[in-house]
Image (tube, rainbow, N blue to C red):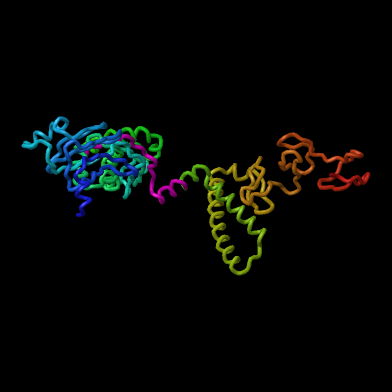
Amino acid sequence: MGIMDRIMGQFIEVIEWVDDSSDTMVYRFPVYSKEIKMGAQLTVRETQAAVFLNEGKVADVFSPGRYELTTQNLPILTTLRSWKYGFNSPFKADVFFLNTRQFTDLKWGTANPIMMRDKEFGMIRLRAFGIYSMKIIDPKTFYMEIAGTRGLFTTEEITEQLRKGIISLFTDLLAESAIPALDLATKYDELSAAARQKISLDFNTYGLELVKFYIENISLPEEVEKMLDKRTSMGIVGDLSKFTSFQAATSMEEAARNPGGGAAAAGVGLGAGLGMAQAMNQAFAAQQAASAASPAAATAGIKCPTCQAVIPDGSKFCPGCGKVAMAPGAILCPKCGMSAPAGSKFCPGCGATMVNKCPGCQVELPTGAKFCASCGQKIS
């Protein structure tokens, strides 16, 4: 120890702390040889508290303000030991500054899924996470229960302990609430308020206050979410047999447009064709069973010239191949696209005229004519 250190140690101390970090909770002021002189100046700023220790015992706790360390403003210290010479000689002591501001954006979350019973899904696993904020409200309790004699104490050293307590209490609260899994998102505010009230009691034992508590998300496992998405999709599809028939017809149409592709494509096409054939067989079997149950329905309609499936009366498209429903020799309505028997002058669906006339000489033209046989005018 150098001479200058000894000389500097004889001057009256100015004890203060300016925090330039974002996570320091406790800081011990460095005093030469832990000898604080009579008349030392102590400054405690707003959002701070100072714990004064003498001979290893908490002598006093100072709130924000400026103090001169004498027997007059250390009444508790005078009861700890009798001073023959007052403060005329150095004494061993420590000053710990505690940061009483609010520490925000602290994370909490479930390391493992929470097992619970749901009324709709049965046994499920849930994960949850969020943020919270806290502050020191009882400096003496926090120092004695948590910080101890460490010269520097940060939030990182306590957040893991607090997180475990949060998860334990939150799990209990979530199970007691009995809220259906699909309705949890609408109850975040209520659950956050109830959790804060429940967890605050645990924080208070450390001299802390749980100021804010937020739930950011409560989610199901990934595989359960995928199954839920499929269930939602099935609800949107509606009649599964009709959807299967439509998908099979669409796949066949796409395959017809791309007949090439080599051996690999042929293999893929073969597998897809087998799958489509199976799906179509199932759809046709269901359709035949329905027709057998209703004989009148089996005879109502016409056969599709492409796939020979029965097209019910009034249908615009074939349920087997998806093409426009047309009987042999039938014509299409130029307005609504519905088929009508050959020779029809009016559409049975919308009532529009089915007769195609030349715009020049008004002679009736056969279906599909591109030029008038009477005057030679081009038909648009």
Q: Residue at x 84, y 47 (%)?
A: 369
Residue 71 x %, y %: 13, 32
Residue 213 x %, y %: 33, 37
Q: Residue furthest right?
A: 375
Residue 250 x %, y %: 61, 52
Q: Residue furthest top?
A: 72
Q: How many marks?
A: 0
Q: Which residues are magenta?
A: 205-229
Q: Is residue 176 visible?
A: no
Compare residues 153 and 208 and report the one nearer the observer: 153
Name which quarter of the figure residue 89 lies in. Answer: top left
Compare residues 208 and 246 and report the one nearer the observer: 208
Name which quarter of the figure residue 88 lies in. Answer: top left
Residue 168 x %, y %: 26, 43
The C terminus lies in which quarter of the figure?
A: top right
Q: Is residue 274 visible?
A: yes
Compare residues 29 and 299 and report the one nearer the observer: 29
Q: Residue furthest bottom?
A: 263
The verdict on residue 358 being magenta is no
Horizontal side of 61 relative to 22 (left or right) equals left
Compare residues 234 and 295 and report the one nearer the observer: 234
Horizontal side of 374 relative to 175 (left or right) equals right
The vertical placement of 237 against 187, above or below, is below
The N terminus lies in which quarter of the figure?
A: bottom left
The verdict on residue 223 being magenta is yes
Horizontal side of 210 relative to 376 (left or right) equals left
Name which quarter of the figure residue 148 lies in. Answer: top left
Horizontal side of 44 relative to 348 (left or right) equals left
